Image (cartoon, rainbow, N blue to C red):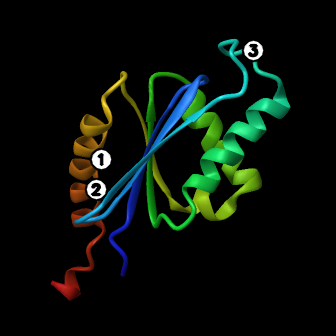
Amino acid sequence: MSTFHAVVWMDHQEAHVVMFDREHVEAQRIPARSHHKHQGKAGDTAAFYAEVAKALAGAREVLLTGPGLARNEFRDWCTRHQKSIAAAVVDSIASDHPSDAQLVAMAKQYFKKFDAMAADPSQT
């Protein structure tokens, strides 16, 4: 089984997508097309969410984080439009504006606990 994880910090302005496994980290910043906070057109928002979903292709487990509602709106959008990404989302948690290094550290700690809880006791 792949250990490839992703963490997405997002608000309505941008998304930081960080994909990682034990040896590698890839970070990508995706700006929203609308420059007006919470007032983007529906098409701009859908295009933004589609770009974030595309960046997550191949991730087995995704943690969403951020300060506002964008992460939950993205999750809902994925449920309707990108079911494979929606299925990979394991949680959505609130956070401030961490650096990419802090984001990876937070996600590694989260996935360590998540993987331990999801482990099959018969396999240990």
Would you say the residues marked 1 and 2 are in contact, meaning their CB atoms lie under 8 Å apart? yes
Q: Position of residue 95 (x, y in %)?
A: 36, 27
Q: Position of residue 73 (x, y in %)?
A: 64, 35
Amino acid, disc 1: Ala
Q: Which element carries disc 2, helix, strand or loop?
A: helix
Q: Which residue is mark 3?
A: 39
Q: Give the residue pinned by disc 2.
A: 111
Dot 2 or dot 3, earlier in sequence: 3
Q: Earlier in the sequence, mark 3 or mark 1?
A: 3
Q: Residue at x 52, y 22 (%)?
A: 68
Residue at horizontal 56%, vertical 29%? 14
In the rendered image, which quarter is residue 44 located in?
A: top right
Q: Residue at x 82, y 23 (%)?
A: 41
**96 or 80: nearer the viewer:** 96
Q: Residues within 10 Å of mark 3 (few under 14, many from 20)?
A: few
Give the quadrant of the N terminus.
Answer: bottom left
Q: Is residue 84 above or below residue 62?
A: below
Q: Give me the C-alpha separation between circle 3 and circle 1.
A: 30 Å
What amino acid is at disc 3? Gln
- State left or right for residue 57 relative to residue 61: right
- Residue 104 percent coordinates (x, y): 28, 45
Q: Dot 1 surroundings within 10 Å: few (below 14), some, or many (20 or more)?
A: many
**Residue 115: horizontal and vertical position, in percent?**
27, 65
